[in-house]
Amino acid sequence: MRNKTGWLLIITCLNLMVMACYVPAASAVRATVPVEQQDSVGIGRVDALPTDNLIYNPWFRTGNQASLDGWIVTSSPSGGWGASQKPGNPTPDDIVGTAARVSTGRGQDRSGKNIDPGADTYLAQVVSANPEKRILKFDMYWVTHTVNPAIVTVYGGFSPQGPWNAVWQPFHQVHTKPIHPESGRGQDLWVYYSDSTDLAITTLSQGYPYYRLEIRANLPDENGGFKISGVYFTVDDEVQIGNRLPLSVLPNTV
């Protein structure tokens, strides 16, 4: 449940590098994933997520290091999702911001590349829930250069292994033209894109004891990049009007 009106500036100037990807063989990731890092004193501070969040490791970190621990990555020979840690990524505390990322790379040497254009990449997590609660809520921080598409699908099931029934698609984005912020700070794009989506809410006709949250991204070209953090998913038995994820990263300069 996001308050999109007050952005706090606790960052220094850095260029955004959006990255990561994975497809055909699913595996639970623990620590050995590619990590994007840059040294700086600045961080992008945000408020903590609501305490009812069902997602494990929503900030993509273990301790003070970027990590995809607890997430399921589906990989392919083309590459896959990786972790990012750099100032400008969202963080709810004093730890340098972290995220999950896919990127086709930047510059002539394709620096930071971890996926080829046109390859589907999947990141997922299975959570347990109270099946009596049929209201689902979803939100996250996100940023992109180009992506076509980025989709979040929620599946319901009666066991943690499935079978899975697609019940909701709270996020669907297509962006094929990179945006350059007037400030020149690539990390300001976190504000531009995250501010464009609200807390998504739906009511199911039937609740489930398990849900699989799946994030799919396909980067269409050599400008491709997609990054996420602060993933929020929960079930509820009532809707609290006006509540949103506290989103207070950076000033809205775009």
Image: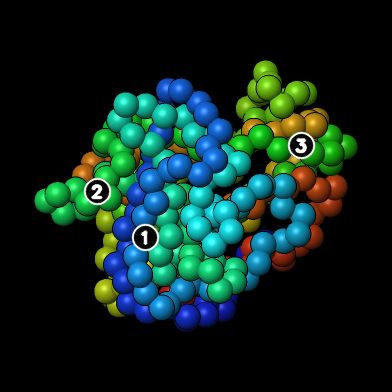
Q: Which mark is residue 37?
A: 1
- Of labels 1 and 2, earlier in sequence is 1
Which of the image's four quarters has the C terminus?
Answer: bottom left
Q: Circle 1: is it few (<14), some (14-19), or many (20+) Cα within 10 Å?
A: some
Residue type for callout 2: Gly
Residue topped by disc 2: 105
Mark 2: which secondary structure?
A: loop
Residues 226 and 72: in front is 72
| In the displayed structure image, the side of residue 249 where residue 126 appears, left or right | right
Give how far across and how far down residue 182 sits, in percent. Answer: 28, 75
* Disc nearer the start of the sequence (2/3): 2
Residue that mark 3 sits on: 128
From the viewer's perspective, is residue 116 above or below residue 231?
A: above
Q: Residue at x 52, y 29 (%)?
A: 27
Q: How is the image coloured?
A: rainbow
48 left or right, relative to 100 = right
x and y percent of residue 102 in the render?
A: 37, 45
The Cα–Cα distance between marks 2 and 3, rounded to whole angstroms, is 36 Å
